[in-house]
Image (tube, grey):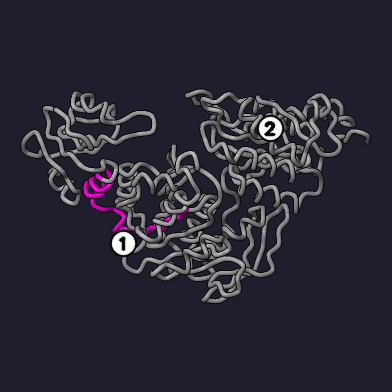
Amino acid sequence: MKLSELIKEIPVRRITGGELPEVSSIHYRAQEVKPGGVFVAIPGTVSDGHAFIDTAVSRGAAAVISQHPVRSRVPVAVVDDSRKALSAAAAAFYGHPSRKLCVVGITGTNGKTTTTYLIESILKAAGHSVGVIGTVNYRFLGKTFPNPVTTPESSDLQKILSDMAAGGVTHVVLEVSSHAIELHRVDDCRMDVGVFTNLTQDHLDFHGSMDRYWESKRRLFTVYLPQKKEASAVVNTDDARGKILASELKIPVFRYGKNIDNEIRETGGRQNLNGVSATVETPSGSFAARSPLVGAHNIQNILAATGAGVALGVELPAIRRGIENVAAVPGRLERMADSLGRFVFVDYAHTPDALENVLTALRAVSRGSVICIFGCGGDRDKAKRPKMGEIVGRLADLAIITSDNPRTEAPLDIIEQTRIGVVRSSPIAFDPAQLKAGFQGKGHLIEPDREKAIRLGIFASSPGDSVLIAGKGHETYQVIGKQAFPFDDRIQAAKALEELRNVQCRTPYVQGLRKGD
């Protein structure tokens, strides 16, 4: 394809270096450039692609797209915004694949991943061939691929969509992060349905304020959705910003939530440790929804997925089957098997709202005490640390503060900023030695080593207790400094449970007793 074709919809300030060549691939990482490819230099958070133009050319780049004039032996197209240019060029290179697909985009602080799994299952129950791009992975036609970020870079996204379309996929469910919107990753991805789940505090280290964070989310509905004829929105009006959004949109809106005026609503919601149930009412009728997903917040996710199904014309029996078919979502209140009478869950909750949701759910259905092992990420929004601590201190009987991807910050500094919130409602500090035979009352402790913290929490529990390991969910690494080390909360929990099982076999009448029993 001629470079001129790739950039014909991009405002180009100037072109240097002669006639624009044919290009055979498109790249934004210099080390991945192939001979004949075009290299798009984009600014990054760690390094700037403009510093690697010479590397890209030495690897055979036939042309460069840059935000700055540069001297090079290959043609250079200078643009105002190379991220926008990358998106437009990639969409053109791969033949605008989103135009050939029915795309559902989901955005919001919490609930995106679970809602994605539910919509995927609903569409499959309706007989469609479905692809998914999200936080856990991307997958289609029975194949699963790792995805390091929620929404891939624009050229990666366009290639994935192209591969899906070529393979016969008809419907794609796409998680859309605020970073992706802000960084123009989805600029040229046409969507048929947009779903808004909620907006609560997160990513303020990137956006700077809740207003700017909201404006990023809002653009999915005000800028991207109207680009496709007959697009519609599914909006949670229990959320204050969602209520405003639903009232201002000029496209069809399916509102969901508790309000009786909503198009999608529920009555008679119930929850226990085996899942949730509710009657879901829609413009097409009502149905009894049952799901093994734990927590009342999952009723909201079910409503969101139902709204997407209704917007796409899926019949209610298929929506009901799709909901029932989702047995679990990786790292979302994922229950560990064979937990010795305990209820051990691993969850991705890493925001104040998500922690409040999952702990409130466990508090409502737990037969015994609630233990929470959690931490806050380094080099991320510091303002949410004491808020998360306060929530765990208030809702858990035992709060164990540990490390969760400290990155370049000192783990103990992060823990102290989190502890300030915990002690507001859980001031008693336990000694780890006190927990060998369980615990009594309400309190907290600090264990920076996450593996040891998980072990402490599980060993402190008794049959009937609920143990929540929060923060990582599906993730399989711990980032210390700038290096990622293998670490999976689910593996560590299983290891601790196996160790506890062996101990109980030797001393069956000691482990798990509360102090004073």
Cβ atoms under marks 1 and 2 closer than 8 Å: no
| Kind of residue at disc 2 | Ile
Residue placed under numbered mark 1 in the picture: 227
Residue placed under numbered mark 2 in the picture: 401
- Residue depicted at x 47% and y 51%: 211
Q: Is residue 271 magenta?
A: no
| Kind of residue at disc 1 | Gln
Q: Is residue 352 left or right of residue 316?
A: right
Residue 240 appearing in the image: yes
Q: Residue 31 carries which label?
A: none
- Residue depicted at x 40% and y 55%: 172
The image shows residue 361 at horizontal and vertical percentages of 70, 52
Query: Which quadrant of the figure has residue 152?
Result: top left
Helix, strand or loop under label 2: strand
The image shows residue 264 at horizontal and vertical percentages of 55, 69
What whole-number distance in Å separates the C-alpha atoms at marks 1 and 2? 46 Å
